[in-house]
Image (cartoon, helix red, strand yellow):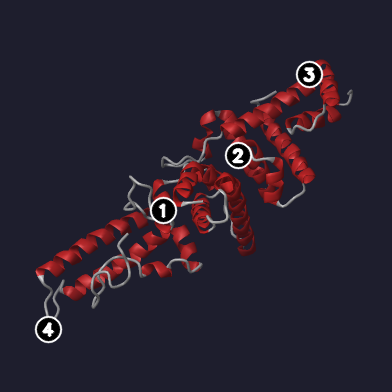
Amino acid sequence: MNDCTEARAAIQERIDGDLDAVGSLSLAGHLERCEACREYEDGIEQARRALRDLPHVPFPDDALAEVWAQTSGPPPGETATTSRSRWRAFAAVAASLAVLSVAVWLGVGNRAPQPTQPTDAEVAQAAEDARMVLALASGAIKRSEQAVIREVLTDRVSPTLQKIPIRWPGRHANDDGSNGA
Amino acid sequence: MDTDAYRDVVLRSKDRVHSYASWILKDREEALDVSQEVLVRLWNHRDTVREEAAMSWLLRVTYRLCIDRTRRRKVRGEVHGDNLFDPMPSAAPGPARLAESGEVGDRIAQALGELSDVDRAAVLLREVQGMAYDEIAKTLEIPIGTLKAKLHRSRDRLRQHLVEAGVTP
């Protein structure tokens, strides 16, 4: 093997396991004589090592929690309470606006008296719901606006709005089919 | 595949799937979307995907979803990509951070970004994921000869980047 082009093709074939014994011997002979092809081989191997050494991009825990929520549920020992996908985060933002409306409706501010006033328990429940939704909303704000816009435009978020586990006006807890997960 | 096997596969493969999608798409948000979708799809196909074949199945579906996304971007004229190569403030590394392996890793990350989608996918599947040639050819829907030609060309381009950067002779 005297030709460097041929030798470099053989180096690649050897990497792919396609170089037979005769070809290997011929290549070895060429490499002994040709420093440029030895450097070529070193460069190829260095590039391959660098590829193998690229670190993984870790899959975030909250994304994993969302996968569990949509599939098998979390493995034993894990909880699903950390689930916050971006589409749920968007839903949480929308829900927080709804909760603010509920708060106004329940009597925050100066409005005319309603026929029935909420009980202390209902107010406490509303406050708890509001805290939960605001916590979700704060996570949502941290998310990429661009990603949320894309999901809205592709109509992938609307079904989840119904899954938000809060008490909507005129509805009883859990009668929306949500289990609060 | 039963529920326990599914969970094992997800735990073993999630970072590989996410890394692969990240490198193909060069966009963190989209890579996360694709990774989640692929892992959920595996659950939906658990009756037909054998546990030992799950990794190949995941990478194959990941590739298809990534290519679908890149095609949609092109149709819409969107400019995506390269944000994976920006410095990242969070713990999740971008290639500036990804280049923990030093300048060589940094250069390889840049060079990868300049390969075509298919060439990048081929190199990642072979050199990073260690997938067999016939599996890669099936995934990319190209003949094995074409695949090898792409691998030869891509390795050579990556090498040239390292030479131009002065990190290899």
Q: Of tags 1 and 4, which is closer to the observer?
A: 1
Residue displayed at 57% across by 44% down: B52
Residue displayed at 23% across by 73% down: A172
- Nearest the camera: B124 or A4? B124
Q: Quickly name the residue at label 1.
A: A68
Q: Quickly name the residue at label 3.
A: A35
Q: Residues within 10 Å of mark 2 (few under 14, many from 20)?
A: some
Kindly indicate whether the residue at mark 4 contacts the one at mark 2 (C-beta within 8 angstroms).
no
Residue displayed at 48% across by 69% down: A155
Tags 1 and 3 on a common chain:
yes
Secondary element type, mark 1: helix
Q: Amino acid at mark 4?
A: Pro
Kindly indicate whether the residue at mark 3 contacts the one at mark 4 (C-beta within 8 angstroms).
no
- Nearest the camera: A62 or B76? A62
Q: Of tags 3 and 2, which is closer to the observer?
A: 2
Kindly indicate whether the residue at mark 4 contacts the one at mark 1 (C-beta within 8 angstroms).
no
* Residue B66: quarter of image: bottom right
Q: Of tags 4 and 3, which is closer to the observer?
A: 4
Secondary element type, mark 3: helix
Q: Is residue A27 left or right of residue B39?
A: right
Q: Quadrant of the C terminus of chain A?
A: bottom left
The chain identifier of the residue carrying mark 2 reads B
Secondary element type, mark 2: loop
Q: Quickly name the residue at label 4.
A: A115
Residue displayed at 36% across by 70% down: A162
Q: Quickly name the residue at label 2.
A: B129
Q: Amino acid at mark 2?
A: Gln
> Cα distance, mark 2 to mark 1?
24 Å
**Mark 3 or mark 1, which is nearer the start of the sequence?**
3
